[in-house]
Image: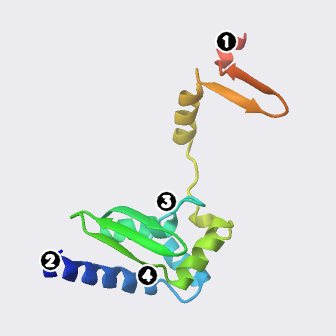
Amino acid sequence: MSVYEDAIKTIKTKEINNFIDSLGDTPDQVADNVQGYEVVGKKGQSNDCPITNLIRKQFNATIVSVTGKVIAVILQNGTRLVFETPKVIASFITRFDAGDYPKLEEKLTSADLNSLNDWLIGQQITVYAGANESFDIILKEELV
């Protein structure tokens, strides 16, 4: 790795850390500030939580993963960054995953549900509700 690449990594890591530090000193402050950026995420998804989506948005990153221990970022130019997750962000993630910040949770839209419905039609599913049987999903019109 060249001195230039090392310098870029150091600068970008510092930029991202400074930005993250600016989000607040408590999980509640982080939640309030993240909401101001109009990003949401999915519980239990290190590659799709609000912090991940905020970093992706603010730094135009290709890939971002945030866990309670590390933050990994791949920028558009291929630069890879991995650094320790600040404790306040780890606490925020734990509370987000527990459902403490529902306003930051991604909601399914009717388009999402229609897409899921379209995919389900014709699929074979195994049901484990006391019985171990397979069945095909059929259209409501087919029931008539």
Disc 2: which residue: 2
The residue tagged 4 is: 20
Q: CA distance from mark 2 to mark 3?
A: 32 Å
Alpha carbon separation for disc pair 3 and 4? 16 Å
Q: Is residue 62 left or right of residue 92?
A: left
Q: Residue at x 50, y 79 (%)?
A: 33
Residue drawn where x is 18% and y is 76% of the image: 5
23 vs 60: above or below: below
> Residue 20: x and y, percent?
43, 81
Image quadrant where one finds the C terminus: top right
Height in image: 2 above or below 14?
Answer: above
Image location of residue 117, percent across then percent down? 58, 31
Question: Where residue 31 sits in the image (x, y, percent)?
Answer: 56, 76
- Locate the N terminus by quadrant: bottom left
Amino acid type shown at disc 1: Glu
Q: Earlier in the sequence, mark 3 or mark 4?
A: 4
Q: Which residue is mark 3?
A: 48
Q: Answer with mark 1 or mark 4, whichever residue precedes in sequence.
A: 4
**Residue 47 visible from this viewpoint:** yes
In the rendered image of this protein, does residue 134 appear above or below residue 41? above
Dot 4 alpha-carbon crowd within 10 angstroms: few under 14, some 14 to 19, many 20 or more: some
Residue type at numbered disc 4: Ile
- Quadrant hosting residue 128: top right
Secondary structure type for disc 1: helix
Mark carried by residue 142:
1
Q: Is residue 19 above or below residue 102?
A: below
Q: Residue placed farthest to the right in the image?
A: 130
